[in-house]
Amino acid sequence: MPNRIILRRLPAGERAFLADALRQETVGGAFLLIATLIALAWANSPYRDSYSALRDHHIGPESLHLNLSLAHWTADGLLAIFFFVAGVELKRELVVGELRNPLDAAIPVAAALGGMVVPALIYLTVTASSPNDSQGWAIPIATDIAFALAVLAVIGSALPAALRAFLLTLAVVDDLGAITVIATMYTETIKMMPLLAAAGVLVIWWFMHRQGVSGWYLYLPLAVVVWALVHASGVHATVAGVVLGLLTRVRTRPGEHTSPAEHLEHAVRPWSAGVAVPLFALFAAGVTISADAMLGLFDDPVVTGIVLGLVVGKTVGVFGGAYLTARFTRARLSPDLEWGDILGVAAISGIGFTVSLLIGDLAFDDPARTDRVKIAVLIGSLLAGLLGAALLRRRHRWYQRINAEAETATGAETATGADAEAGTGAEASP
């Protein structure tokens, strides 16, 4: 009997099909949701001990201080891939996208800032009586790009294309704010020598792109070295991904079909959507939910602050930031968008999930408290997603009706014109 290959390399056509599928927001969001549901089911099953054992299993060289748990590897290592894609998107938006024109960028940028400030203020207000909990203020400021774009894509095709650009710009600026907070507020000690060495390697990365050097086998080792040095410096290692993305060239040169940034994003996005983010969710979202814990859940001000921050704070902050900017500055909302559209996007921006879970792990050391943080992030993200989906679904139906009326009017005008031409032809006939 011939040997059967259980795990074999897929043919080129199937690999290309799978990669293209993973670049779609709905597929990436589905992978993230599936991983989250598996984590919750596993952590609340009779096999919960095996989940904890796998999550806490350490691998890696001890001599390089990289003997980390699998949960740590996914949070510090794999999420760097996710933040690299975010960094490339931000660089593209700054150079050739929505953010290159200050007036065009003003409203989504103000919306993103409002969506960070208001949730943080709500959280700090709710937890004011418990000063030890204030370090979690950044948990509700984040927006999960994968989930938010997936919700927008699933709602319907009748929504304006400009709405996706608005959400993407908002989420990219939001990610930059979140990673800045992680780098500055959740870094206890910084070792300068590894950080300076990482800066030197980053200069080499930038110079190679400037000189048009190509070849993934050259850039991948540099990226790994930068990540290891940033990790050794004490700064959260995901910062390395954002900086590498920001230093990647986004403009094409004569003879190039695509820029290095577009090429790298095209190649890396499937790994981010199909591997990095789902594996992070698998090890981060697994929390045991007991009846006793749920009974007194909202007695904890941290939980209340996170849920209110994600659901209320994000909606009010994003919409308010956009509206006030349009009201009191020269910036104007895209003519393709209505304020009802912005309200729906403001609501789904409360899906914090990936980055919120990451910040929650950094903010609190107590396992019992981090479990409650995870439950709060899951509840807040779910409520924000449902609220946003309801609002955007209503907008979708409104646009469908408007488009149908426009098509009917166009058809009537065409028929009237045809009848008039026919009548003129009949009068001219002998």
Image (cartoon, rainbow, N blue to C red):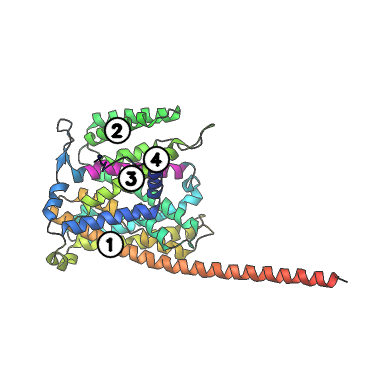
- Using the rendered view, name the quadrant where residue 114 is placed: bottom left
**Residue identified by numbered label 1:** 380
The tag earlier along the polypeptide, 2 or 1, is 2
SS for dot 2: helix
Query: Residue 134 appears at what percent x and percent y?
Result: 21, 54
The tag earlier along the polypeptide, 4 or 1, is 4
Cβ–Cβ under 8 Å for marks 3 and 1: no
Q: Which of 412 and 87 is in front in this view?
A: 412
The tag earlier along the polypeptide, 4 or 3, is 4
Cβ–Cβ under 8 Å for marks 4 and 1: no
Question: Which segment is the magenta one?
Answer: 73-94
SS for dot 4: helix
SS for dot 1: helix
**Residue identified by numbered label 2:** 226
Question: On residue 272, which mark appears?
Answer: 3
Query: Residue 7 appears at what percent x and percent y?
Result: 27, 42
In three-dimensional space, the C-alpha distance between marks 4 and 3, rounded to whole angstroms, equals 20 Å
* Quadrant containing the N terminus in the rendered view: top left
Query: Residue 402 appears at what percent x and percent y?
Result: 54, 69
Q: Is the magenta stretch mostly helix, strand or loop?
A: helix
In three-dimensional space, the C-alpha distance between marks 4 and 1, rounded to whole angstroms, equals 41 Å
- Using the rendered view, name the quadrant where residue 26 is placed: bottom left
